[in-house]
Amino acid sequence: MKILHVADTHLGYSAYRKVTEDGINQREVDVYDAFKQFVDYAVKSKPDLIIHAGDLFDSVRPNNRAITFAIKQILRLSKQGISFVLIAGNHEHPKLKETGHIFSIFDHIEHIYPVYNAKYEVVSLTINNEKITIHAVPQSSSKDEFDNNLDKLKSDSSSDYNILVTHGCVKGIKEFSMNEFNELFIPVSYLKTDFDYIALGHYHKYTEVSKNTFYAGSTECLTFTDSGDKKGFIELELTDKKLNHSFITLKNRPMIDTKPIRCFNLSLDEVMKKIKDTVGAVEPEGKIFRIILEDIPSHLYRGIDFSEIRAQSNKAAHYEIKAVIVRDSDSVFSENSRINALSQEFRTFLGNQNIEEKETLLELGMDYIWRVEARDEEE
Ligand SMILES: [Mn+2]
C-alpha cells in the first residue's frame, strides 16, 4: 500500500511586501505552488491514500483565493479516485464553535474525508482488498478534550493496517513546539507500536520521532528559523507490516538566514563591507534572505547606509536586517532618562517579572521587535 503523508501546507499564508505581476502576494503564491507540486506528484504517482496531518489552511477564515485553490487541487485528487484523509490543525480550528469550520467545504467530495469536529473519528477503507483504518484525532478546543480523544484511541485488530494521524507537539522525548497559543501536546505514551504508522502535523521540520512516527514538516519555509530545512512530504510503502519511507523534497524559493555578523569591535566601514560581502554571496535575485547584525553599537547602526544595501538587494523577493543593538557607552543621555534599545528594555523588563515561561516570552517578544525594526529599515 502506497501512502503520502503531508502536513502544514498553510494555504492562504502571506508575508512580506513583494507581489506578483497580478498583484498577489508573492509568498502566498509560493505556498500555493508548493502544494500544487505535491498534488502533481500525487496525480502522477497515484498513491492508494493521502494523509494530511493538519494546517491545510493558514487560518480559520482563509481568503477566497485560498479556498478556491484548495478545492481545485483537492478535486484533482478526487477525480483520480485517490482517498484523501485530512484533519484540522490549530491554524484552521475556530475558537468558537458557531464560527463553523472551513473544512465543511470538503464534506461532500468523493474520496475526501475531512475530520474537523474536535472528536476522534475512524475512517475505514478497503483498498486493493486490504483493510486500512485511519484513526484521526483533529485539533480540539481544549487540552482536556484532546486528551480525552487520545484516551479513546484503539487500533482495530481486524484491519490489515492501522494508522494514527494527529496534530500537535509530541511531549516526552524532545519538545516539538511551535510556540503557538493553542497548540496541543501529545504525550509520547500515545505513540504506540500497534499503529503501523503515525502521521503527525504541527512541527514544521521533517522529523523521524520513532520508527513508526513522523512529522512530515511544512511544505514551505514560513520563518527564517526553518529556512535551513528541506521541505516536502513523506512517501510510504506498507507491505506485510513492513514500513519503508522516503522523503520527497519540493522545489521552493530559496530562503536564507545568513551567518550573523559580529559588529562589536568593527568600524562602520568594516560593518558595511561585511554586509555587502554577505549580500553578494547570497546572490539576491528571486531569493528571501536576512542579514543579522549582532551586538552593533547604536551609533554604528545609525551610520549604516541602508540605501546602498537596498540597491544591492533590489532583485530579492524579500530581505530584512535583524539588528541586536547595544547602547553606546558614550551616550549623551543622562543616567536617569536613558532609554536603551527596545530589545534591551524588554529583556530587562522581563527579567524583573515573576512569571513562568520567561524564555518563551523573551523569544516571541524579541522576534516581534526584530520584525518591527526590520520593517522600519525597509521604509
Ligand atoms: Mn502548522
Image: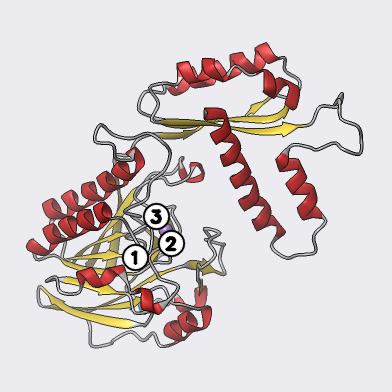
How many neighbours does mark 1 have within 10 angstroms: few (below 14), some (14-19), or many (20 or more)?
Answer: many
User: Where does residue 5 sit, x and y in percent of width and height?
Assistant: 29, 61
Q: Which residue is mark 2?
A: 202
- Please state the quadrant of the image where ligand 1 appears: bottom left
Give the residue type that dot 3 points to: Gly
Instruction: Look at the image and tell me in which quarter the N terminus lies.
Output: bottom left
* SS for callout 1: loop
Task: Tell whether 327 sits left or right of 107.
Answer: right
Q: Residue furthest right?
A: 335
- The mark nearer the N terminus, 1 or 3, is 1
Q: Which mark is residue 53?
A: 1
Q: Nearer the viewer, residue 145 or 353?
A: 353
Q: Position of residue 270 (x, y in %)?
A: 66, 13
Of the two numbered discs 2 and 3 on the same chain, state the one appearing first in sequence.
2
Q: Which corner quadrant of the image does residue 81 belong to?
A: bottom left
Q: Secondary structure at mark 3?
A: loop
Residue type of the residue flagged with mark 1? Ala
Q: Residue furthest top?
A: 269
Q: CA distance from mark 1 to mark 3?
A: 10 Å
Q: Is mark 2 within 8 Å of ligand 1?
A: yes
Name the side, left or right, on which 50 lies relative to 211.
Answer: left
Q: Quadrant of residue 101?
A: bottom left
The residue located at (19%, 60%) in the rendering is 71
- Name the residue carrying label 3: 217
| Amino acid, disc 2 | His
